[in-house]
């Protein structure tokens, strides 16, 4: 089903104030309700290659798969929702592509990327992530971080070694414990969430959340939520005004209307006829 | 790599590099840092280093461990912290390696299983992970009190919300200085001047609003809204929503951000207001 009427999506990506390369990559397909953000790493331009491969492979493969699958029902055999399975399969494909490229071409050795993907379907959102790129939800004036970083710092916080306040002072901010394309296989973290009209979702690379406090992100979304493009530009500008030490990428998704999938026999017939 | 500098009565005795994951401190000879003094316990304390971070832990010593004059059981060490054991002082120095290119700062790296252990042998040369992750000062998180925003709500139909619309209080007094966001950590940035908006027409003529937040919206949601952004370079006004664009000094603006100069006159939703810098 076409989600163009139900969702508004804007994205911004910027190299920041210090870096010459932009190793972040963003992609979206509003009609299929798919957004992908990747923050690449690796020497020379390998980071750009890895993040570019991740977004391209996932978007094109997911587009093909979504056009074939009409239903997002739960698979009775595995108990997994169809959306989760689709994301898992195509993230695995992207992982293989990046891993093989890094193995076969010496200039790409060791490249990898973080990833956050959201798929909107049937009033729900399925989110998959690997590494420290994040997804936030703005609902009723309240900003909440939905994804939990796969990073050394997060593990230290979870184990009680340091508090979130101390984490802001830590020098180990930039160590991720999971990445796409580093190993032959990767385990993404995938969850389903309910999406409500009025929600604004923010996908961002660590260039935003390291440079701009959650309070300021929240303020930008609250005050500029009516103009999503301006809001995205404002977030990038705030990161750059605060030093812009890393590439900054943001994708904003606003849920405008209900987008329940059609159910019943008629819908299925129309589905076949498509 | 981080160091501990041992001193007594201001006299530097020795320097220790925190090359191991655990660096023990105590009176007994098997300690990495041996302090042969009766005020120091046999096994007094330990410093656990994880890549660029170090944690000090007191091992139940008789006389305790102080950091910057405070008794601690466990402490996340920051540059220039002073650890005291009896009369002895250990200064924790953690300086970022100066020779590494700025471009390498904060590059995201993958920490793979085994990488942690690889940092242990001190003589084995830096591992890829340890080599590229350069410690550096983190910017102070913009510390401002949410909810402290005043709002001059109700000049005619036009509302002014400073940041969170929910926090709009009835008071029209200027914001307390505490609510100002921390200045962005730019090294040579001059102290930014605070801009003020004064209403010129309508029922609220004469009222003033200090623009202390990074974002201040003006207007009425759904009809016409503009935002004034506070940046290190100064103040900018941008159209947010509505069919009409704000008018600046008699000229209608386009959708781009426009810098505000001292004594600019803004017209928005039928209300005129003047922007100026507070002296």
Image: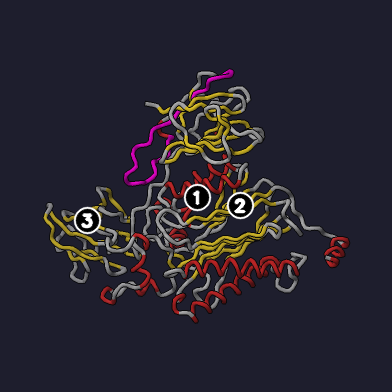
Q: Of A269 and B91, which appears nearest the observer? A: A269
Please name which of the two marks, 3 or 1, marks the residue nearer to the observer. Answer: 1
Q: Give the image quarter of residue B167.
A: top right
Q: CA distance from mark 3 to mark 2?
A: 50 Å
Point out which mark residue A236 bears: 1
Residue at 49 percent of width and 47 percent of height = A214
Chain identifier of the residue bearing label 3 in the image? B
Is residue A37 found inside the magenta-colored segment of the image? Answer: no
Q: CA distance from mark 3 to mark 1?
A: 39 Å
| Image vertical order of residue A218 relative to residue B148, above or below | below
Left of A179 or right of it: where is B32?
A: left
In terms of secondary structure, where does tag 2 sit?
strand
Task: Name which residue lies at 56% across and 19% down.
Answer: B201
Quadrant (top left, top right, bottom left, bottom right) of the C terminus of chain A:
bottom right
Subunit of label 1 = A
Q: Residues within 10 Å of mark 1 (few under 14, many from 20)?
A: many
Q: Which secondary structure, mark 3?
A: strand
Magenta region, residue range? B179-203
Q: Which residue is mark 3?
A: B91
């Amino acid at each position: 089903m076409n989600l163009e009427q139900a969702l508004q999506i804007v994205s911004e990506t910027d190299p920041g104030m210090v870096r010459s390369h932009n190793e972040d990559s963003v992609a979206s397909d509003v009609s299929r309700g798919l957004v992908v953000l990747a923050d690449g790493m690796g020497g020379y331009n390998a980071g750009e290659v890895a993040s570019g491969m991740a977004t391209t492979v996932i978007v094109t493969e997911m587009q093909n798969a979504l056009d074939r699958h009409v239903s997002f029902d739960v698979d009775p055999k595995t108990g997994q929702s169809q959306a989760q399975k689709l994301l898992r399969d195509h993230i695995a494909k992207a992982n293989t592509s990046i891993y093989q490229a890094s193995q076969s071409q010496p200039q790409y050795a060791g490249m990898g990327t973080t990833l956050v993907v959201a798929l909107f379907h049937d009033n729900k959102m399925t989110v998959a992530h690997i590494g420290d790129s994040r997804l936030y939800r703005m609902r009723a004036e309240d900003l909440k971080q939905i994804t939990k970083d796969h990073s050394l710092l997060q593990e230290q916080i979870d184990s009680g070694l340091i508090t979130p306040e101390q984490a802001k002072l830590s020098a180990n901010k930039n160590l991720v414990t999971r990445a796409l394309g580093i190993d032959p296989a990767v385990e993404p973290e995938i969850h389903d969430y309910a999406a409500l009209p009025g929600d604004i979702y923010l996908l961002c690379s660590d260039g935003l959340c390291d440079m701009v406090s959650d309070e300021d992100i929240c303020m930008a979304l609250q005050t500029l939520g009516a103009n999503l493009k301006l809001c995205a530009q404002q977030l990038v500008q705030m990161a750059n005004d605060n030093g812009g030490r890393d590439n900054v990428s943001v994708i904003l998704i606003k849920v405008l209307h209900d987008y329940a999938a059609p159910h019943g026999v008629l819908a299925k017939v129309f589905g076949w006829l498509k | 790599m981080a160091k501990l500098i041992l001193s007594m009565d201001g006299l530097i005795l020795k320097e220790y590099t925190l090359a191991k994951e655990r660096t023990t401190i105590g009176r007994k000879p098997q300690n990495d840092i041996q302090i042969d003094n009766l005020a120091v316990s046999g096994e007094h304390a330990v410093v656990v280093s994880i890549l660029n971070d170090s944690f000090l832990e007191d091992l139940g010593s008789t006389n305790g461990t102080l950091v910057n004059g405070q008794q601690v059981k466990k402490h996340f060490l920051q540059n220039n912290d002073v650890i005291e054991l009896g009369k002895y002082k250990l200064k924790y120095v953690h300086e970022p390696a100066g020779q590494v290119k700025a471009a390498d700062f904060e590059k995201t790296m993958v920490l793979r299983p085994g990488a942690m252990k690889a940092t242990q042998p001190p003589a084995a040369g830096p591992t890829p992970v340890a080599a590229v992750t350069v410690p550096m000062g983190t910017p102070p998180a913009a510390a401002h009190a949410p909810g402290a925003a005043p709002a001059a709500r109700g000049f005619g139909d036009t509302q002014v919300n400073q940041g969170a619309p929910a926090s709009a209080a009835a008071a029209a007094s200027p914001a307390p200085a505490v609510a100002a966001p921390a200045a962005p950590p730019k090294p040579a940035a001059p102290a930014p001047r605070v801009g003020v908006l004064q209403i010129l027409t309508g029922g609220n003529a004469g009222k003033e609003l200090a623009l202390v937040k990074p974002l201040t919206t003006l207007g009425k949601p759904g009809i016409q809204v503009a935002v004034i952004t506070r940046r290190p370079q100064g103040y900018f006004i941008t159209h947010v929503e509505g069919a009409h664009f704000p008018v600046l000094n008699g000229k209608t603006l386009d959708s781009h951000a426009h810098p505000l100069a001292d004594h600019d006159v803004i017209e928005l939703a039928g209300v005129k207001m003047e922007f100026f810098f507070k002296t």
